[in-house]
């Protein structure tokens, strides 16, 4: 009986440490399925997330006026070309209702080179995902199910985050 209690304590503490060291990470207890997820590219063409099944997906919601978004965007940009994630698709979706010119200037100012601009459509994904604020990143597995989210800014280049995310690649 003592062995079982010690074992459970060890396992639960190991899991807590893993989460604690990844800033703002919330791992879903149950995977979440969404019906249709669509948004717009810079040419106002509709993007359907179902076209990317089989990929690890990160949806990052941001706005030009958001200081924490500005802080995390460079690390998100470099995550897109991180060698460990050849099937990772990152969609940086502007939900601030800014026009393409202002969003493009934001990317240029931060020297964002690996991400493309996307915009929320009138259906508003912020409501669909029940976002509490920005930045928020939704992580979707290869089967199209949300398995985690990052609420607030984070360093996407942090070693602990990279190691954790590799398990879903």
Image (cartoon, rainbow, N blue to C red):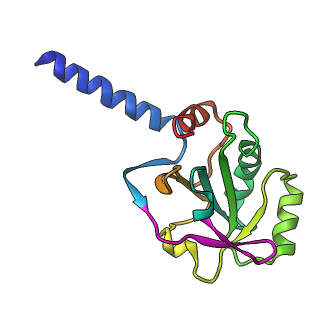
Residue 61 in percent (x, y) is at: 63, 63
Q: Exactly how many numbered labels are in the figure?
A: 0
In the visual, does 143 lie left or right of 31?
right
Can residue 150 be seen?
Answer: no
Q: Which residue is drawn at the image coordinates 57% and 35% (left, top)?
A: 166
Name the residue nearer the viewer: 73 or 53: 53
Residue 108 in percent (x, y) is at: 89, 59
Residue located farthest toward the left when viewing the structure as drawn = 1
Q: Quadrant of residue 97?
A: bottom right
Residue located farthest toward the bottom when viewing the structure as drawn = 122
In the visual, does 165 lie left or right of 63?
left
**What are the residue bounds of the magenta stretch?**
33-49
Q: Is residue 101 above or below residue 82?
A: below
Q: Which residue is drawn at the image coordinates 17% and 16% (left, top)?
A: 3
Residue 7 in percent (x, y) is at: 24, 21
Residue 33 in percent (x, y) is at: 43, 62
Q: Which residue is drawn at the image coordinates 61% and 35% (left, top)?
A: 162
Q: Is residue 60 above or below residue 47?
A: above
């Amino acid at each position: 009986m003592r062995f079982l209690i010690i074992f459970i304590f060890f396992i639960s503490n190991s899991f807590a440490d893993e989460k604690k060291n990844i800033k703002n990470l919330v791992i879903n207890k149950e995977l979440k399925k969404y019906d249709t997820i669509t948004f717009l590219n810079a040419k106002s063409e509709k993007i359907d997330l179902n076209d990317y099944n089989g990929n690890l997906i990160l949806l990052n919601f941001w706005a030009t006026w958001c200081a924490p978004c500005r802080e995390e965007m460079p690390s998100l940009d470099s995550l897109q070309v991180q060698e460990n994630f050849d099937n990772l698709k990152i969609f940086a979706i502007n939900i601030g209702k800014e026009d393409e010119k202002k969003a493009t200037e934001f990317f240029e100012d931060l020297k964002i080179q690996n991400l493309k601009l996307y915009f929320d459509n009138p259906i508003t994904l912020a409501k669909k995902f029940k976002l509490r604020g920005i930045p928020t990143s939704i992580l979707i597995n290869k089967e199209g199910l949300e398995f985690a989210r990052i609420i607030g800014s984070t360093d996407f280049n942090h070693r602990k985050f990279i190691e954790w995310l590799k398990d879903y690649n």
